[in-house]
Image: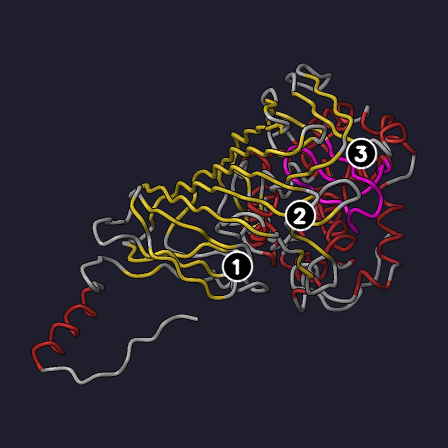
Amino acid sequence: MKQRTPVRRTAPAALALLVLAAATGCTGGVEGRPGAAGLRDPYFPRLGNGGYDVTHYDLVLDVDPAAQRLRGTATVTARATQDLSAFNLDLVGLTVASATVEGRPAAVNRAGQELTLRPDAGVRLRKGDTFRTVVRYSGAPRTLTDPDGSREGWLRTADGSVALGEPAGSMTWFPSNNHPSDKASYDIAVTVPEGLTAVSNGEPAAPVTAAGRTTYRWHVGEPMASYLATVAIGRFETKDTKKSRTAGGIEVFTAADRAVAADSAPVLARVPEVVAWEARRFGPYPFASAGAIIGHPGDAEYALETQNRPFFAGPPSAGLLVHEMAHQWFGDSVTPESWRDMWLNEGFATYAEWLWAADKDGVPVRSSFDAAYRNDANWAFPPADPPTAADISEPPVYGRGAMVVDEIRRAMGDDTRFFALVRGWTKAHRHGNASTADFTAYVERTVGRDLSELWSTWLYGRSRPAQKG
């Protein structure tokens, strides 16, 4: 708990100094004011923190999979967006051994998921300054249960562990500004017992083994939201193709649990094909590498679009691979401004499945639309306004979200113009964040007319409209 200052009598002169300090935002010689604890996300108001933007995470982890424990050092480079007297990082569980800000010891306070750091009095964090924070920590990372009942965070697997972070789980294994609106580059080093493999985001360096332990290093040069970071530890069969069949020579790195490696091989072989197919429709692939991680069935309850290489609990179908790879454009590169905007991720990824089924299996997009229209579950609530945090991954966000995309296509009446609109959207917000309001305004500018009826009916309407022919 936070320590409270005992009440005591204050002399008039001292009282005047306290009033002056409060008015100028200075206390105890420290300039500025504390950054906000929480960004007031519509569904997860405590996630994220104010007062700074992270530009880079350097994570060094030493993991004991048998004991499910880790020791970590997180170096967080950030830019102050206000004069800061203190700031917060999100971290659940784990024991913080020490913290420094700009190389000097910082006071540390824990309250729930909030790790509050107060820099030394000699450290001034002024608006616009870039500063570096180092946190050393250890412990047994936790598994979280989401409002919808699913598990995330640090999950134990048959031969190791996997870290999955949507929407909040990344704070179980590293301290962060844990909200999709603050993206950063990453370096991730993971040391595990020799014989195990540690797979993460980005591009790998050559592993180094010493004294019975192997260190795997990964670099993510493009901005990444914290919920998309992953580490998968286990006995994997890996394949690293430096120059793949994808447009632009994108590196493809895949990893499959040895128990399912043979069954996974056919779908993993299609990764370059899927990336190239989606790039023709959605614009250039936004990252330096692609791939997939396939764990053992039962490792998790879902697939997740972890950046560069989505995670799958068991060999996926071609349709599921298409869905998660589409997220590399919709969700990973163009990331939602808040969790209310999740339909922009899932609607487009679901629509990618419909497009694939049309191209590869001869199932017309309109047939997929009609099936989604008839599904009562898709009409439980508007896709752009889920009623609670437990609903952000429910059917309307996916199926009705895809119907919104197809209604835009029908409104344009020209496939060439429609796919130009989609490619323009992914280009305009490449490696950034976007909201539903950003999207609707962009579509109307591109189409050249008001589409209020479309939005009010398909995106925000609370009842199923009559289906037009």
**Which numbered tag is attached to residue 257?**
3
The quarter of the picture where residue 102 lies is: top left
Residue found at the very far left of the displayed protein: 13
Position of residue 437 in the picture relative to residue 192 (left or right) = left
**Amino acid bearing label 1:** Leu
Q: Residues within 10 Å of mark 3 (few under 14, many from 20)?
A: many
**Dot 2 alpha-carbon crowd within 10 angstroms: few under 14, some 14 to 19, many 20 or more:** some
Residue at (64% x, 17% y) in the render? 248
Q: Is residue 245 above or below residue 256?
A: above
Query: x, y (%) of residue 381?
Result: 73, 66
Measured in 3D between alpha carbons, the distance from the residue under mark 1 to the one under mark 2, in whole angstroms, is: 25 Å
User: Is residue 444 found left or right of 321 in the rendered image?
Assistant: left
Residue 68: give its label: 2
Please, what is the three-letter code of the amino acid marked with disc 3? Answer: Asp
Specify the quadrant of the image occupied by residue 283: top right
- Give the magenta-colored segment's residue range: 292-317
Q: Position of residue 128 (x, y in %)?
A: 29, 44
Q: Is residue 226 above or below residue 284?
A: below
